[in-house]
Amino acid sequence: MANKICLALIRKSDEWVGACSSSQWFGQDDGGKAESLFNQWSNAEAAKFEKEYIPEAGADVVGGGATTVVVSLIVEILGDSTKFEGAGYSLTGTKEVLSSIAADVLVEEGDNVNAVEAFWTPSERDEVLTSRDIIVDFPELITI
């Protein structure tokens, strides 16, 4: 899933307006701490949404107006080769972060990935995300 999301985002890089990334490295014996931080970051992102919308399979989804979309990808992965730092500071840096994640989640057929959580807003096609919404809910985003 993370690979496909990263590739889809890279393909739309001409439409990016902002990005950010952060990471935390844990030693081999700190798996519980890594999982706890993953859960904290996932819960922090989930808390930004007033509701969760997942269309039913085969549902007839009607498109809405033009809007900005925010995609949050949280990854817990083994190893220390994945480049997480640099998204948001430049288009190239953001592509490098996404490319590194896309490649590394496939190592060992994905067995090195402990967890992935993906969020996107707006989740309903008829919702529009305003600039104010982005500033309030995603102040960490850096304009590219």
Image (tube, grey):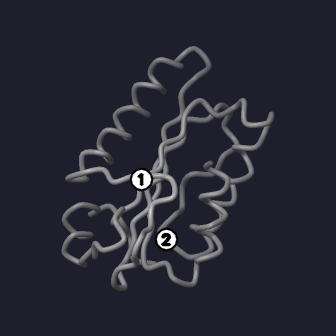
Q: Position of residue 53 (x, y in %)?
A: 33, 54
Q: Position of residue 101 (x, y in %)?
A: 65, 51
* 1 and 2 marks in contact (CB < 8 Å): no
Q: Of 56 and 70, which appears nearest the observer?
A: 56
Q: Which residue is mark 1?
A: 119
| Residue drawn at x 66%, y 57% as measured from the top left | 4
**Number of marks in picture:** 2
Q: Of 128 and 111, which appears nearest the observer?
A: 128
| Residue drawn at x 70%, y 31% as measured from the top left | 112
Q: Is residue 25 above or below residue 2?
A: above
Q: Position of residue 109 (x, y in %)?
A: 79, 36
Q: Secondary structure at mark 1?
A: strand
| Residue drawn at x 80%, y 34% as measured from the top left | 108
Residue 26 image label: none
Image-based side of 18 in relation to 115, left or right: left
Q: Which residue is mark 2?
A: 89
Q: CA distance from mark 1 to mark 2?
A: 22 Å
Marks 1 and 2: which is nearer the front?
1
Q: Amino acid at mark 2?
A: Tyr
| Residue drawn at x 45%, y 60% as measured from the top left | 59
